[in-house]
Image: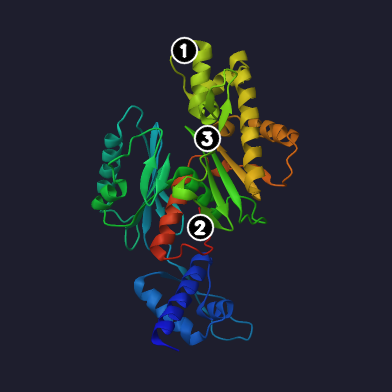
Amino acid sequence: MKKTDQITMRDHNQRLVLQALFNAKETSRAQLAVDLELHKSTISSIYRDLDDIGFIEDLGEGDTTETGGRKAKMIRFNRNYGFVVAFDMGRHHLRMAQVRLSGEVIATDEFDVDGLTLKQVVDLMMKNLHRIKPQKYGTQEGVMGIAVGVHGVVDHNQVTYSPFFDYSGIDLADMLGQVISVPVLLENEANYAAVYIRDYHDYRQIDQYDNLIALNIHYGIGAGIIIDGQLYRGLSGRAGEVGRSIVWSQNKEIIRMEDLYSEDAMLKRLAEALGKKEIVRADFVACASHNAPETTALIDDWVRGIAQMAYDIIQTYAPQALFIHSRFIAEMPELLGRVIEVYQDLNPTCQSELLFANHSVYQATLLGGAASVTRHVLDLEDVDLKFSH
């Protein structure tokens, strides 16, 4: 075997061991050799290298073996090796989280950015990075990377389109990377939400969805698509822009779906119906709870619109499951059943499940971003990893 081939095989085996350590609640060198079908000497050599880096956490001795032999030394991936800073750049908010490489949230923060310019929002992000930079939160290495979820299109780590901010001439990754010299990954927020569902397995443990879609209904509407376990980004990162699907008005005007059914659009429509300048989501929910006729009509239309959108997406991609992220459903849970009922009335030909991502409406983008950066840092971008809350 050539030396280059030996190096390649060694790297492959090391990635296998690191993956197994990451996914295990606890394991041992002997168990790794059995599970990965590698020679014990290979495992021992890789173990030493990973331990020198700090990737391995010693959990102490396990139970005595059945044959009465020496107790095994139990190990796993070091949960306190480092952490990722994740941002979710919304239209009205900036959310932030510090997340361990293994997935657990260390701290979160949220800032109102309504009315701020992009420069002001970026300045706020940089200010917080300067604050976090010297802190380690009990980890060995501190900040290992930065994730940014953007409500727009991202291609080659650059924002190429956003309905809320003008990113032209702004290299956001470079600006943030100058504050802390670590990898900075930008991605569409719905794509990060889909990665979250895949990597955190935020659904029934008995199920396994390698083909799934996250439908994010927030200030706009977007879909994150996982095909055969991998994020599908499409040409120039534009896959999943389902909110820009069009319908024709009675006057033959083009209307985009997100201009009708996104959260912002619904709030605007209710404000106009009530003759108010603006309303917030809490006002909408309050009106709905009192069965205000204006709100009832809007919700009926929203249910039909989201059911139609789900139907079109499922007929196109045939995923195992479509997960809806919607704060409206989080605060008015009965809407999910209504959406499913209308969806079933459309006679779908695909047996995809239509589910509500209840546990992740507010953190999916942050945690999916953290998982993506962790994969990048560990060079495990294309393998199955199990992150924990």
Circle 3 — which element? helix
Residue 308 percent across, percent down from the top left: 65, 33
Q: Earlier in the sequence, mark 1 or mark 3?
A: 3
Q: Which residue is mark 2?
A: 387
Residue 359 percent across, percent down from the top left: 56, 43
Alpha-carbon distance for marks 3 and 2?
30 Å
Q: Residue at x 37, y 54 (%)?
A: 84
Residue 211 percent across, percent down from the top left: 61, 53
Q: Residue at x 52, y 19 (%)?
A: 269
Circle 2 — which element? loop
> Which part of the image, by quadrant, shows the N terminus?
bottom left
Considering depth in this image, is 96 or 63 the residue closer to the camera?
96
Residue 292 percent across, percent down from the top left: 60, 14
Q: Of circles 2 and 1, which is in front?
A: 1
Amino acid beneath label 1: Lys
Circle 1 — which element? loop
Alpha-carbon distance for marks 2 and 1?
45 Å
- 191 to 43, vertically: above or below: above
Q: Residue at x 53, y 73 (%)?
A: 27
Q: Earlier in the sequence, mark 2 or mark 1?
A: 1
Q: Of circles 3 and 2, which is in front?
A: 3
Amino acid beneath label 2: Phe
Q: Which residue is mark 1?
A: 276
Residue 243 image label: 3
